[in-house]
Image: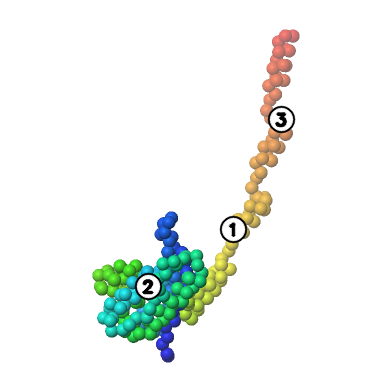
Amino acid sequence: MQQFISVWVRDPRIQKNDFWHAHMDYEICIHTNSLCFTKKISCVRRRYSEFVWLRQKLQANSLLMIQLPELPPKNPFFSLNNAQQITERMKGLQKFLELTLESNMLLSDSCLHLFLQSDLGVSKIEACASGRSHYSVSQAVLRCGCKLRRFHSQEDLLETSRKESCDSDSVRSRPNHNQEETQALSLPDRTRPNHNQEETLALSLPDKTRPNHNQEEDTLSMSVSS
């Protein structure tokens, strides 16, 4: 099978550093079957200044044996609200990555893989690539990009559909306790005595077993006086 490396630079977003300062970053998506990549599908976000660092780092690591492609020039009048400038910069960044990934020498650089497929910052990329971190390059790549992934392999789609079918079957076979409770509350309880009705009935009927104290007192007083 012929190997391929597809890269996209898209989805520009304005990120606010504080109330007064902001910057724009871009999503870098990789889709490949190349053996050079630990992860075949990934998405990370990078800003323009990190692209500048990457080019300088790759140029230094290659010992000037290869001339790297150019980045879109830095524009001092670049506006975060200018759609044309943002589009031109995105196209220039994507072209830079496409040309960079064509070089087998640059593909062997760990900094490039950490830049494309990890969420590490510049300083942490340098530490990881030089072996000064407690995690390897592969570990840093594999633990990143799960939430931003937009592409799915055929195995992932089959697994997702299988889980959805299992969940739907379990929901159908499981009784709906909420409906049962609602029906139980809506139906009258014929087996339970109605205490309110009993009390009302007791108050409405005369109590023939209890003596009438008023009649006894009146009879006694009349007999004494007579």
Quarter placement of the N terminus: bottom left
Mark 2 residue type: Phe
Q: Does residue 15 appear left or right of residue 107 in this picture?
A: right
Residue behind mark 1: 178
Q: CA distance from mark 2 to mark 1?
A: 56 Å
Residue 30: where, in percent of width, then height? 43, 78
Q: CA distance from mark 2 to mark 3?
A: 101 Å
Q: Earlier in the sequence, mark 2 or mark 3?
A: 2
The residue positioned 34% from the left and 67% from the top of the image is: 121
Q: Earlier in the sequence, mark 2 or mark 1?
A: 2
Q: Secondary structure at mark 1?
A: helix
Residue behind mark 2: 51
Visible residue check, residue 146? no
Visible residue check, residue 177? yes
Q: CA distance from mark 1 to mark 3?
A: 49 Å
Question: Which residue is most to the bottom?
Answer: 1
Of tags 2 and 1, which is closer to the observer? 2
Q: How many residues crowd mark 1 within 10 Å: few (<14), some (14–19), many (20+)?
A: few
Instruction: Check if mark 2's residue and mark 1's residue have beta carbons within 8 Å.
Output: no
Residue behind mark 3: 208
Q: Nearer the viewer, residue 145 or 76?
A: 76
Mark 3 residue type: Lys
Of tags 2 and 3, which is closer to the observer? 2
Q: Quadrant of the rendered structure where residue 27 is?
A: bottom left
| Above or below for 61 versus 123 | below
